[in-house]
Amino acid sequence: MTRLKSFLLAGIISISGAVSAQKIFIPKPQKLVVENGSYPLGKEIKIQENNIPEAEYLSKQLQAITQRKVILNTGKSDIHFNFIPQQKNGVEGYYKLEVNAEGVHISAPDNLGLFYGIQTLLQLVEEHKNDLNLPYLKIEDYPKFAYRGMHLDVGRHFFSTEEVKNYLDYLAAYKYNKFHWHLTEDQGWRIEIKKYPKLMSVAAWRKGSQVGPYSDMKFDTIRYGGYYTQDEIRDVVAYAQKLHIDVIPEIEMPGHAQAAIAAYPELGCTDQKLDVWTRWGVSENIFCPKEETFKFLENVIDEVVELFPYEYTHIGGDEAPKKTWKESQFVQNLMKTLGLKNEEEMQSYFITRMEKYINSKGKQIIGWDEILEGGLAPNATVMSWTGIEGGIHAAKTGHKAIMTPTSTNYFDYYQGNPETEPLAIGGNVRLNKVYQFNPIPENLSAEESKYIWGTQGNLWTEYILDFNHVQYMIFPRIMALSEVAWGTSNPDQYKEFEDRVIAQFPILDRKGIHYSRAIFEVEGKITNDNGNLFYNLSSAKNPKNIHYTTDGSEPTIHSKTYQSPIPIEKSEVVKSAYFENGKKVSATTVQEFTFTKSTGKEIVLTYPPADSYKANGPETLVDAIRGNAGNHGKDWLGFDGKNVEAIIDFGAKTRFSNVSFANVDRNGSWIYLPKGAVISVSNDGKNFKEIKKIGSKEIEKSKGNVSINFATQEARYLKVVIENLGIIPDGFPGAGSPAWLFVDEISVN
């Protein structure tokens, strides 16, 4: 064989091998080369100990996977650990993994790198567990982002320390390094504070809970609660440290405080006796900026910082309605004394004062992006959740930012069809949306981008009653975000990532993890080609295995086979499902299309929707699909404090006498019905004549489905203005903040 042929063959082996070996790695390594050959693990697997704590961890994991005897020894071994010099760029978590004729070699500058190499090795062993012949390969790997986090809310529903440890195991498996533990809420205080025993006897327990959809406003009367003792906290933190995970506690302030105020009424601004809140959403009862409140919080912080060694503490700072502050003479007088212009500046004073105290304890603060209101505390890190704007502002002003927008990082949102998924808070965060997320906004410079510390997935638990449901909501989305955070995600190769996710499912099965199979659902997307609508179907596997009907019947293996986008030319219902070996393996996806005179027509919006809720852009409003109010993240456009002002061009003069549209009414999420609507017509697209106007009473009667009749018009252009509620009034969730307005499908008849 010539040298050239040998070189080419080696290259082919490397490439083809790499494809095979990468079908299970999540997150994908930065660099991987697979070579010809394999190393067999014997009936006894020997690990070279070298006094490395991670060796014992590896031993336990290998025994669980292989069911073979694993020995820690100092002699000849199958698996070797090596410490190497620190890399020039100082990347945290750097490691090398090599499998060759001498065995498995994991090399790193420190124990953290060895631990990440172990996680990659464990996935490789899982892939080859049938024969335990590990392919020769070389991996050089390191994370892109220093902050790779997952969050767990235990305020709405409580989870045992063992369940929290299981959660940490999941994080470790996918190389997350931060655990954000949300410990205090309106609905329950979950951490023992010895100086304040009523936090455990009163604040940790509520008299009942909201049940079912938020709109039903139904409640049970079952006493619910729990808290972690300080010993339990220490136990969890110690467990996390072994997994190289930093634990960040969240102690909410000044909002989300009703549970604490129920225990100690003097912390509030009213004399009202409160109970721990039983409903979801945001209570208007927030901490009052009195000296006794600050003393209380300082004493709480004193105990918290002793339990959590990591340098960061999360102070919340989000969703703090100012109603009680506005009505409190004490607060108004204090604002005058301090020279503060408004309640937002009072919140900034509150946060800044607490930051100064926390800094004095050697800690730094993280807060949700509302801490930007009234001015950002000097050393604060911003966790940007309402969108990416908070993170952009933080980065441009020299503050660290953690990107966790609702549109891609909220794992309490639906990940599949709401008709077949467990009840969720709403929204639409499918696996592909998570995978497509880029934590670094396009409009940041290279220097500003350095302040994007990383990203985090959030799991709020209003509708998550037990740990099985926790597992279901994070898996497999935790895999997608891990690859985003590691820096090796590639949206253009999403299908390849899906294959690796599916290859991970047997691992989850072995571990007894309850996970979502929504990945197998048929997903439909409407496209507009010069006014002609087409319904595109896709699935995680071969799209040729999708079968569908258009006559309302359930799809079977004998139904039409999907081969190309389905033209939508009339009102009809398309039902589709994915099949393997003649059997349906997904729930049926049902999509109803309602054709009207506006369907597929050109539409322009004066004000764009929020980036987090822009669906398919303006065309979403005329795509023949009516949004599902239970899933406001899909097929809806969301506007934060803005009106909807849409102009539809029919292309020619058209006769019509009715305009209808739908809205979401979900006050607990700060989404409100519009306060009015105005219909106007034009023949030149510039000069519009108003023909009908309705107000809040008509809107409220519609319950979100607005239908406006008027005398028959003949015009080329239609202008629809749907008026945002504006600033949310006192007494309602989100009071003092701009209301969200969600709109879909402007139908014209």
Image (spheres, helix red, strand yellow):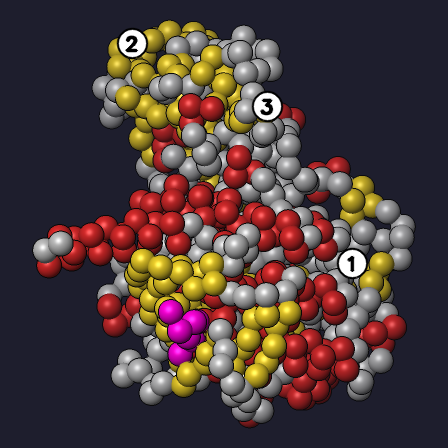
Q: Which mark is residue 653?
A: 2
Q: Residue at x 65, y 77 (%)?
A: 239
Kindly check if marks 2 and 3 are in contact, taking CB atoms under 8 A apart as contact. Answer: no
Residue bearing the label numbered 3:
583
In 3D space, how far apart are the residues under numbered discs 1 and 3 (Cα atoms)?
Answer: 47 Å
544 vs 246: above or below: above
Relative side of 694 to 27, left or right: right
Q: Residue at x 48, y 23 (%)?
A: 546
Amino acid found under the numbered disc labelled 3: Lys
- Lower position in the chain sequence, tag 1 or tag 3: 1
Front one among 590 and 94: 94
Q: Is residue 110 visible?
A: yes
Q: Secondary structure at mark 3?
A: strand
Relative side of 294 to 655, left or right: right
Front one among 41 and 335: 41
In 3D space, how far apart are the residues under numbered discs 2 and 3 (Cα atoms)?
Answer: 50 Å
Q: Position of residue 565 (x, y in %)?
A: 37, 20
In 3D space, how far apart are the residues under numbered discs 2 and 1 (Cα atoms)?
Answer: 56 Å
Q: Nearer the viewer, mark 2 or mark 1?
A: 1
Relative side of 454 to 592, left or right: left
Q: Secondary structure at mark 2?
A: strand
Decide whether residue 366 is among the magenta residues: no
Amino acid found under the numbered disc labelled 1: Trp
Q: Secondary structure at mark 1?
A: loop
Q: Residues within 10 Å of mark 3 (few under 14, many from 20)?
A: few
Amino acid found under the numbered disc labelled 2: Lys
- Lower position in the chain sequence, tag 2 or tag 1: 1
Q: Which mark is residue 277?
A: 1
